[in-house]
Image (tube, grey):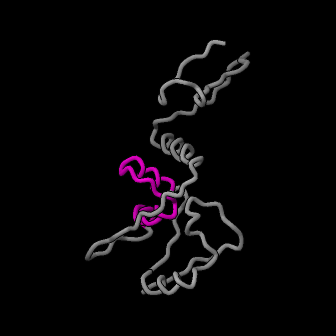
């Protein structure tokens, strides 16, 4: 059995997987981890974000970052599925800051080529606004506002 406990941070680290970012394992969880965990690996935040969106978009599952790290480890090749038997990943938790979801969606859409950001220089341009929030029209809609 391989067992490695990752180095612990001395102060809080901002992460999508905040539910599993603990300073040390507890008196109940440590013996369970010693018995059942073969290996602990690190995954990138970007991979966790990708998996959260993958699960939302394709499986209709709302999984918090700490619950998405197992799939992230599999998809990134940090761990490999068992050669025999069944590989199981627990998808847990829905405790996601709702303010974070639009950022995950924008990042995912940009990466998938469904969102475009354009930077340009226009002479004598005073102001351009693209406002979607607080307006009464379809979620995917946009329209010109005449002032």
Q: Is residue 56 magenta?
A: yes
Residue 133 lies left or right of residue 74; in this view the side is right
Q: Is residue 16 magenta?
A: no
Mainly helix, strand or loop, the magenta region? helix
Instruction: State the image coordinates of residue 30 (x, y, percent, origin top left).
Output: 53, 84
Q: Residue at left 49%, top 45%?
A: 108
Q: In the picture, residue 131 is in which quadrant? A: top right
88 shown above or below 93? below
Q: Which residues are magenta?
A: 49-77
Residue 124 lies left or right of residue 1; in this view the side is right
Instruction: State the image coordinates of residue 139 (x, y, percent, origin top left).
Output: 49, 30
Q: Residue at left 51%, top 54%?
A: 49
Q: Residue at left 57%, top 85%?
A: 27
137 shown above or below 21? above
Instruction: State the image coordinates of residue 41 (x, y, percent, origin top left).
Output: 50, 72
Instruction: State the image coordinates of residue 103 (x, y, percent, origin top left).
Output: 57, 45
């Amino acid at each position: 059995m391989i067992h490695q406990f990752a180095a612990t941070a001395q102060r809080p680290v901002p992460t999508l997987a905040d539910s599993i970012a603990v300073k040390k394992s507890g008196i109940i969880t440590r013996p369970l981890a010693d018995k059942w965990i073969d290996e602990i690996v690190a995954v990138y935040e970007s991979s966790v974000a990708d998996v959260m969106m993958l699960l939302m978009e394709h499986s209709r599952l709302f999984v918090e970052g700490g619950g998405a790290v197992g799939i992230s480890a599999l998809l990134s090749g940090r761990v490999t599925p068992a050669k025999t038997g069944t590989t199981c990943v627990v998808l847990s938790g829905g405790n996601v800051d709702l303010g974070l979801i639009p950022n995950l969606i924008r990042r995912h859409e940009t990466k998938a080529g469904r969102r475009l950001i354009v930077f340009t220089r226009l002479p004598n341009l005073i102001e351009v606004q693209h406002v979607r929030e607080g307006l009464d029209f379809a979620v995917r809609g946009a329209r010109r506002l005449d002032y």
